[in-house]
Amino acid sequence: MSVALPPIPFTKPYLAGDELSYLTEAFSGPAVVGDGPYTARANELITKITGGLGSLLTTSCTHALEMTALLLDLEPGDEVIMPSFTFVSTANAYALRGAIPVFVDIRPDTLNLDEAQLEAAITDRTKAVVVVHYGGVACAMDEISAIARKHGIAVIEDNAHGFGGSYDGRPLGSLGLMATQSWHGTKNIYCGEGGSLVVNDADLLARAEVIREKGTNRSQFFRGQVDKYRWVDIGSSYLPADPLAAFLTAQLERFDEIQAPRLAAWDRYDEALRDWAAANGVATPGVPAGCVHPAHVYYLVMPSHEQQLGLISHLKGRNITAPFHYVPLHSSPAGERFGRVGPQGCAVTNRVSESLVRLPLFTQLTAEEQARVIDGVLSYPL
């Protein structure tokens, strides 16, 4: 009787060491609600790593994106350009304001928004372009920023994958007017559910603080800058409790420790699989010169949808979880209802969505487990 191999999950949360003690301290102190001492510490660390002007912890990356829509003063009929190959929150945040997501295709090498198609999608209603650094590999920010400046539109970085990455020596998160981060349990650094808004404009940062506090100047009140806090702008409750920030702080303080094994595992995948992939018509992640990624995703783009399903099933038979990724937003029911496709279509997005397989990647992934994954991929009969 054969013994089943132990399962290898796609991802696994990592405890760096101080999370539980910080949680206990936070729950034992007077500032269990938001904007306590751990929130301040987490904001400081996030600002340092992203190189932004300032950071505000939020309840999710989704809510951080919603805050960018509020800060842009979007109105019904305004347009926001973005890739279709992204999570639904990227579009939802702007559709909630009545703006129209305009879906542009991705590059086949990085799976990022294709900068060559950006300008053709801009109209007199375009207010912003949202770039998504897929897998933490930076978009072509020089080209995108130049086009945005030419047309007077804002650049927003959806940096949910890219915390710790950089572009030509500049940290991801510092390259747009605003950026958003995710601390979801599937991310390299996490607190279960959480996010951050990184702002690179002083006036917007001050307003973001108000929007995050339900449209009040409550933060100014607690700093002694006003005698009472009042309702001064639109806003909502985007502020997480300080214990979540405590957990996140413990992760952020050990960022390099968490990252080192992930980076090594990403490199091992690439070394072991790149030649096999090239010989079999399988695409591996493209990392342009000047881009440093944080090893968030290692993926394979198979030659066909049948091969995608085949590899997922083959690895599942070896007790290895290797999922596909996004269903394109432009072809989703809500995408068809609330958005529209750019003038050059989304052919690459359609093909990649039906062909991509993500391999297990997490800090605790052992050499033996990774060898099993690599052997599983190499043994798949193409």
Image (cartoon, grey):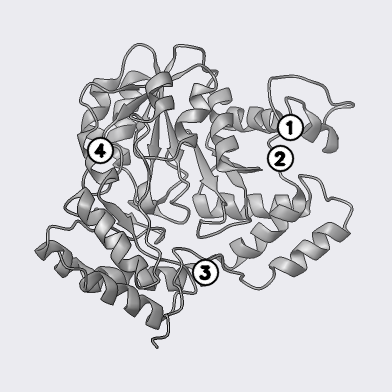
- The residue sitting at 20% across, 25% down in the picture is 344
Q: Identity of the amino acid at label 3? A: Ile
- Observer-side mark, 2 or 4, equals 4
**Occupied quadrant, residue 313:** bottom left
Q: Mark 4 points at which residue?
A: 350
In the rendered image, the quadrant that contains the N terminus is bottom left
Task: Please indicate whether residue 255 sits to the left or right of residue 30 in the image.
Answer: left
Q: Identity of the amino acid at label 4? A: Asn
Q: Is residue 286 visible?
A: no
**Most foreground residue, 352 or 137:** 352
Q: Do the residues labelled 1 and 2 touch (CB within 8 Å)?
A: yes
In the rendered image, the quadrant that contains the C terminus is bottom left
Q: Mark 3 points at which residue?
A: 258
Alpha carbon of mark 2 to alpha carbon of mark 4: how far?
36 Å
Q: Are marks 4 and 1 in contact (CB under 8 Å)?
A: no
Alpha carbon of mark 4 to alpha carbon of mark 1: how far?
40 Å
Name which of mark 1 and mark 3 comes first in the sequence.
1
Question: Is the residue 353 above or below the residue 11 in the image?
Answer: above
- The residue sitting at 87% across, 60% down in the picture is 28
Q: Identity of the amino acid at label 1? A: Glu
Q: Do the residues labelled 2 and 4 touch (CB within 8 Å)?
A: no
Name which of mark 1 and mark 2 comes first in the sequence.
1
Q: Position of residue 36 (x, y in %)?
A: 79, 49
Q: Mark 2 points at which residue?
A: 239
Q: Mark 1 points at which residue?
A: 213
Task: Please indicate whether residue 35 sits to the left or right of residue 193 in the image.
Answer: right
- The residue sitting at 44% across, 63% down in the picture is 10
